[in-house]
Amino acid sequence: MGALGAAAAQSILGASFVVSRNILDYPTLIGQAVRYVLATALFVLIAWFSARRSLPKMPVLQIPTLKELFQLIGISISGLVGFNIVLLAALRHGDAPAVGTIVGATPLVLAIAGPLMIGQRPAVRVLGGAALVVAGVAAVEGGGYIDGIGLVFALLTLLGEVLFSLFAVPLLDRFGPLGVSLWTCALAVPMLGILAVASGEPSRLRPPTGTEVLSFAYLGLFLTVVAFLLWYSGLHRLGAATAGMFIGLVPVVSLAVGVAFDGVQPSPMRIAGAVVVGI
C-alpha cells in the first residue's frame, strides 16, 4: 500500500496542472489560502470521524511540543508557502522544462539525504534507481533556458520539495499522515494571509467564477487532502529514499494529461524518458 499510495499521490499532482491553469487569474496567495482553509476543514472532519470510530491508522490529533511545532512550521514554509513563491519566481526567469528538470532531481537528493538523516548509509540499489528516474525526468522535461537568478530560485524550489518530505519523517510516528497534513495546512493559512495583505492582493480580490470554484474544490479535496494523506502514508511506510522515486511520475502523468486534454504530440525523447521513469 505504501508504494501505491506514493504513486497515486504524485499522479494526482501531475494531473493537477490542467486544473491549476483555471485559477491563474485569481489572486495567487489568497487562492492558496482558500485551498488550505478548505483542506484544513476536511482534515478536521476526518480527525473527528476517526476519533469517533477509533480508527488506528488515523490517530486523534495530537498537540505538538514546541520543537514539533517548529518542524511543522518548517514543512508549511518549505513545502506549501515558500515552494509556490519560489516556483513562480523561477518560472519568471526560465522555461518550465528547465525548472522542471532541476526540481526533477528530487528523487536523487532524497535517496541520499533520507538515509543520512536517520544515521544510515544510502543504499546503492536505491541510488541507482533514483538516478535512473532523474535521467528519465530530464528527458521528459526536455531542458530549456534559465538565467542565473532563475537557477537560484529553481534550486530553492528543489530544496522546498525535499524538505516537505524530510521534515515530516520524524513526525509521522506520533502524528500520523493525518496529523502532519492537518497541522501543516492549518499553519500555512495565516502565513499566506499575512503575505497576501503585504503584497496588496486584497485590493484585487473578487468573487471567483464557477470554474474557479470547482478548481479550488478539486485542489483542496484531491491535490491536498487525498494526495497529502497518500503521500505521507507512503513516506511513512517506505522511507524518504524509496518514496522519493515516485516523484518522477509527476512530469510523466503531466505529459499524459497534456496528450489527452491538449492534444500534445510528445517527441520520441519525451516518450523514452517516460519509459525510463517507469523502469
Image: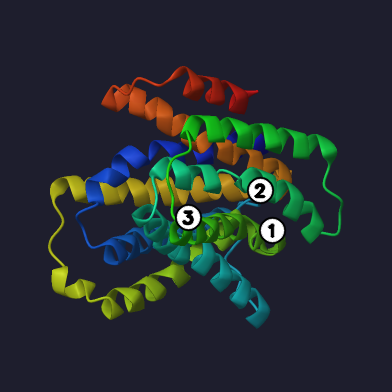
| Dot 2 and dot 1 residues touching (CB under 8 Å) | yes
Q: Residue at x 12, y 64 (%)?
A: 206
Observer-side mark, 3 or 2, equals 2
Q: Residue at x 42, y 20 (%)?
A: 267
The residue carrying mark 3 is 46
Q: Residue at x 29, y 26 (%)?
A: 261
Say which of 23 and 128 sits in front: 128
User: Outermost residue, top direction?
Assistant: 268
Query: With respect to residue 198, does 58 lie above or below?
Result: above
Query: With respect to residue 139, does 35 lie above or below?
Result: below
Q: Secondary structure at mark 1?
A: helix
Which of pointers 1 and 3 lies earlier in the amino acid sequence?
A: 3
Say which of 38 and 88 sits in front: 88
The numbered disc on residue 235 is: 2
Q: Amino acid at mark 2?
A: Leu
Residue 202 visible at all: yes
Q: Residue at x 14, y 47 (%)?
A: 210
The numbered disc on residue 169 is: 1
